[in-house]
Image: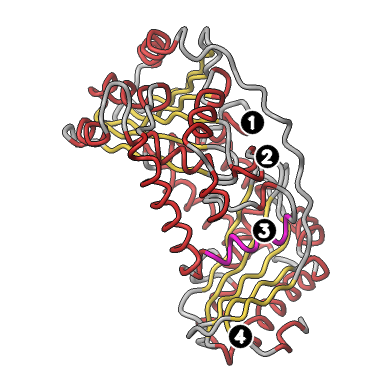
């Protein structure tokens, strides 16, 4: 793999990772604006805009945008996060010109047809309604809202029924014209790619088009608030989400966090999987996950159980966390879960779409390139002493948060 980076005359950054033996590539254009950069009244506008750019450009209809990539076996897609939006296309390497042409078309030439706008708002409203019914996803949105109270990092990516209903087509057009520009755009490409060819294509197409950048408000750092919350609902299972603070994406102890998360609930050999599923049979699905941003992080544990067993499940989670804090992590455990974490990252990286995301995220967070070897060295540098320090800092019972959705006994709060 060979990495290169250029900043074009219009302020756009281009990073590429060449995989000479690949037959395809994935190109992504990142817009450095997400939910946390929105105003309260326009909450969800970044995600709604992501939907709308696929409804047609000055050059292509909505159907043509889909057809032009799929006709070559490629794919066009996008996703919105709390901190950025990414549009990406996967294609054969020989179709790089088409790939980039389509991406640049949607981020600079979208027309936002009036007849599609209200219809797409209804689609997003349906998405919001669906997310409220998808309990194993809904609890994560509520958790963010509760632990980052009144901070935009806790706002739902989809917005609310009220905010989506109030957004006008003019709001969308103005947001698009001001945010999709210059320094706020970044291209990340992984696969068999010629860096100079890519830069020339982007420069020729966007050189004079998106020169001036939008001056965003500085992002304020969120403050974590520990909480307990019960959402009563008459459903078959009780959904439990417990968590605590974790490092940000760029924090020095992020490597410890990956190993700890793997040990806690990262697989079938993890502490919680063995305790909750294998020994007690309380849940079909139990896992832990890291949700990191540029300046904050959460380590969350999820499981869904029979309402009558919710209290026992919470007790086991708290008991295991306290036991880890009390007994620490042995050298053999560290080596086992370190190897597991390394293997997962290496397998994840064996995919050009994932590499595009990794290279792009490293540019956004660190403004530099990290090889897989750099990451593996960071994991190798973790010691039992650094893990002890990590656990003492983050795994604190007085900072645990608990969200329960469903039916449960009030004694569940006595953790």
Q: At 45% across and 55% down in the image, what residue appears?
A: 125
Q: At 63% across and 76% down in the image, what residue appears?
A: 231
Nearer to us of marks 3 and 2 is 3
| Left or right, residue 310 beside residue 134 | right
Indicate the quadrant where residue 217 lies: top right
Q: Which of marks 3 and 1 is nearer the N terminus?
A: 3
Between the residue at mark 3 and the residue at mark 1, the CA separation in whole angstroms equals 27 Å
| Left or right, residue 11 beside residue 200 | right
Between the residue at mark 4 and the residue at mark 2, the CA separation in whole angstroms equals 35 Å
Between the residue at mark 1 and the residue at mark 4, the CA separation in whole angstroms equals 41 Å
Nearer to us of marks 4 and 2 is 4
Q: Position of residue 208 (x, y in %)?
A: 47, 7
Q: At 71% across and 42% down in the image, what residue appears?
A: 295
Q: Do the residues labelled 3 and 2 touch (CB within 8 Å)?
A: no
Mark 4, Cα crowd under 10 Å, few <14 / some 14-19 / many 20+, is many
Give the magenta-colored segment's residue range.
Answer: 138-148
Q: Which of marks 4 and 2 is nearer the N terminus?
A: 2
Q: State the residue position of label 1.
A: 366
Q: Where is residue 44 in the image (x, y as percent from the top left)?
A: 55, 46
Mark 2, Cα crowd under 10 Å, few <14 / some 14-19 / many 20+, is some
When the figure is inspected, residue 374 is found, relative to residue 186, above or below; the finding is: below
Q: Earlier in the sequence, mark 4 or mark 3?
A: 3
- Find residue 145 and name its label: 3
When the figure is inspected, residue 408 is found, relative to residue 257, above or below; the finding is: below
Instruction: Locate the N terminus by quadrant.
Output: top left
Q: Which of marks 3 and 2 is nearer the N terminus?
A: 3
Q: Are marks 3 and 1 in contact (CB under 8 Å)?
A: no
Nearer to us of marks 3 and 1 is 3
Q: State the residue position of label 4.
A: 310
Q: State the residue position of label 2.
A: 250
Instruction: Tell me, yes or no, whether the highlighted magenta stretch contains residue 150.
Output: no
């Amino acid at each position: 793999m060979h990495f290169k980076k250029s900043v074009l005359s219009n302020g756009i950054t281009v990073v590429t990772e060449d995989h000479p033996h690949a037959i395809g590539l994935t190109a992504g254009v990142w817009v450095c604006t997400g939910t946390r950069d929105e105003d309260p009244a326009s909450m969800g506008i970044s995600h709604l805009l992501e939907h709308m750019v696929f409804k047609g450009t000055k050059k292509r209809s909505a159907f043509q945008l889909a057809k032009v990539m799929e006709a070559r076996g490629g794919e066009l897609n996008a996703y919105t996060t709390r901190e950025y939006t990414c549009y990406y296309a996967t294609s054969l390497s020989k179709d790089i010109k088409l790939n980039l042409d389509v991406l640049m078309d949607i981020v600079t030439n979208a027309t936002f047809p009036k007849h599609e706008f209200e219809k797409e708002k209804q689609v997003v409203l349906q998405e919001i309604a669906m997310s409220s019914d998808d309990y194993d996803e809904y609890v994560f949105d509520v958790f963010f809202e509760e632990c980052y109270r009144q901070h935009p990092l806790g706002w739902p990516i989809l917005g609310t029924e009220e905010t989506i209903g109030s957004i006008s087509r003019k709001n969308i057009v103005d947001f698009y014209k001001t945010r999709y520009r210059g320094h706020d755009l970044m291209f990340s490409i992984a696969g068999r790619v010629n860096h100079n060819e890519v830069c020339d294509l982007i420069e020729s197409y966007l050189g004079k088009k998106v020169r001036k950048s939008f001056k965003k408000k500085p992002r304020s750092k969120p403050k974590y608030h520990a909480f307990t919350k019960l959402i009563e609902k008459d459903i078959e299972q009780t959904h439990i989400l417990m968590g605590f603070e974790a490092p940000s994406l760029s924090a020095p102890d992020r490597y410890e966090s990956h190993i700890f998360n793997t040990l806690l609930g990262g697989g079938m050999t993890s502490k919680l999987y063995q305790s909750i599923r294998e020994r007690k049979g309380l849940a079909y699905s139990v896992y832990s996950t890291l949700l990191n941003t540029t300046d904050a992080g959460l380590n969350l544990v999820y499981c869904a159980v029979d309402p009558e067993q919710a209290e026992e499940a919470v007790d086991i989670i708290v008991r295991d966390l306290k036991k880890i804090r009390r007994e620490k992590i042995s050298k053999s455990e560290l080596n086992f879960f370190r190897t597991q974490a390394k293997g997962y990252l290496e397998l994840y990286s064996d995919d050009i779409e994932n590499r595009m995301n990794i290279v792009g995220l490293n540019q956004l967070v660190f403004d530099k390139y990290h090889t897989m070897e750099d990451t593996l060295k960071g994991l190798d540098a973790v010691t039992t002493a650094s893990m002890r320090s990590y656990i003492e800092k983050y795994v604190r019972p007085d900072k645990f948060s608990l969200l329960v959705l469903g039916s449960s006994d009030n004694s569940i709060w006595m953790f």
